[in-house]
Amino acid sequence: MAASYDPSHPPCKALSASDRDSFGYKTMQARLPVIITKVINDVYQTYHNLPSTELDLKEKEKEAKHIISTISELRYELQHDKKFRPLRDSEDDVEEWNQTLADHFEGSSWFKAPWLFAECYLYRRVRETFALTQHFRDYDPFHEQKKTVFKSSQKAVVAIAVRLMSPSEDSTANGTEGLSSLDILVSQGPESVGTEEAFFELAQFCLWGNATDLSLLDNPDLAKVEELQKRMMTSTASSSNNSSTTSLDKQLEEQQQGKGGEETSELQKHEEKILANDLNALWAKVKGLRKGRVDFILDNAGFELYVDLMFADYLIRAGFASEVVFHAKTIPWFVSDVMPVDFQWTLDQLRYASSSSNDSAPFFDPSDPAEQKALRDLGAKWQSYVDQGVWRVTSDDFWTSCYAFYHLTSLPSAQDLFTDMKKSDLWIFKGDLNYRKLVYDCQWPTTTPFKKAIGPLGSREDVPSLVTFRTCKADVVVGLAEGVEEKMDKLANDWQVSGEYAVISFKQ
């Protein structure tokens, strides 16, 4: 009989804020109170900026003040490690949440419960506050933060759009006139060298786009975000291998000798930071697909979503997929996670780039007309994918539940979702939280095989192939070769949580 796990009893000891040396403790003690304070400030700014002619102005101001008071009480509960209480709204998932609280967390509290549950519970409590209002029911208190960081990404966004849509200046061969750089690469078919080169480069873009995560950037350094994206854009295509141990030896030697490794290309520097790299195995899977279905379990809105769409576009253009399903969150979640409205908003900002048709100034407004056209053409192309059903955007309460992904195969409320997802050829899980939920956020030895750590998703025959693209921002990491953890501890003592290192883990 298969082992059964519940939210309070993962396969091994849960990560918890009760451990003062853990990143979970830092999150609960320092980071989450800052995030909650920003919610309070956002609501304050919103209702103070309401025009005097606003309909129901007094009622909205009263509700906003009540939201601020309620969120302040939530911050107090967290900071003083109060016991969890049941949810009080009437959302579709409230019964499941309250049953889970009663069955597994009665008498537990913020710092004593598993970190994964406590953090999910916090964002669900934030949602409760807005769900109990009339005028702010659909309000996203993180929307302005998402917009600000995405706005800072314009240079990288434009560079990618030009590559995907503008005729390549390097095109001189017969039959490639007018094609974009990407279309030239994939024009020789799925088995061509160009298609393979594009895969390895764009897959790494898809990975490192996860580095800008608003739930971890308490005070986002927009210059740092832009510099990271600039480094990504100067990379050149290269094949990948699983040589993390060799790369770490090189990094340690350079560190000890005071060398900066100037001879190393930007892409190689990034590759050396992928501590478990299954890109070759993923490529073997992808290149065998012909007009298949690929599912993205999304993470962050903004630039990460943009590069996810870029990679999904590549899969369509190269002929590997004819359908891509994007799984978004149903509610505002972990600050920057994608909801369906964020998905459509992103396409709209591209379609209306530098356009005066909007009531407000265009979100993206490059001065070069060719760049403006590339953005608009890309937005139109991606919108056509949605309109034609080539891309499908969906959401399910399972993604914002307290359950690890072990329970996707067995939780009664998730069975419609699982039945649909079994029709897919490949699941792509993006980001840190999805990784934590895949491996149940517990104290696995770092050498634990990824397939073992994902439980039923690794052992059941009816689960499609899956891969996770994750920059490391929490204590749990699996799938590393022997000795990697020890070398990383010497190289960077915060390697598990800094977002500077990554894993790409694949299950056939």
Image (cartoon, helix red, strand yellow):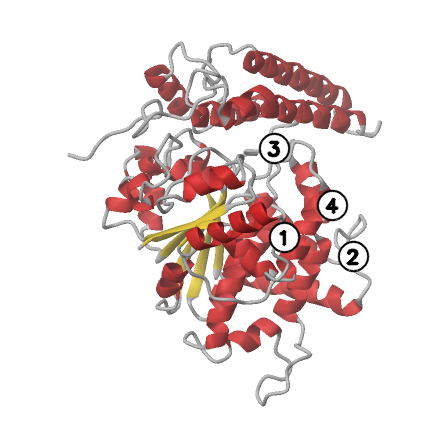
Residue type highlighted by circle 1: Gly
Mark 4 vs mark 1: give the one in front. 1
Q: Secondary structure at mark 2?
A: loop
Q: Nearer the viewer, residue 228 or 293?
A: 228
Which residue is the site of mark 3? 138
**Mark 1 packing: few (<14 Cα in 10 Å), some, or many (20+)?**
few
Mark 4 vs mark 3: give the one in front. 4
Residue 289 horizontal/vertical position (percent): 36, 67
**Mark 3 packing: few (<14 Cα in 10 Å), some, or many (20+)?**
few
Mark 4 to mark 3 CA distance (whole Å) = 31 Å
Q: Is residue 2 left or right of residue 213?
A: left
Mark 4 to mark 1 CA distance (whole Å) = 22 Å
Mark 1 to mark 3 CA distance (whole Å) = 49 Å
Which residue is the site of mark 4? 223
Residue type highlighted by circle 2: Asp
Q: Secondary structure at mark 1?
A: loop
| Residue drawn at x 48%, y 16% as measured from the top left | 111
Q: Is residue 448 left or right of residue 472?
A: left
N-terminal of the pair, mark 1 or mark 2, is: 1
Which residue is the site of mark 1? 260
| Residue drawn at x 64%, y 15% as measured from the top left | 72
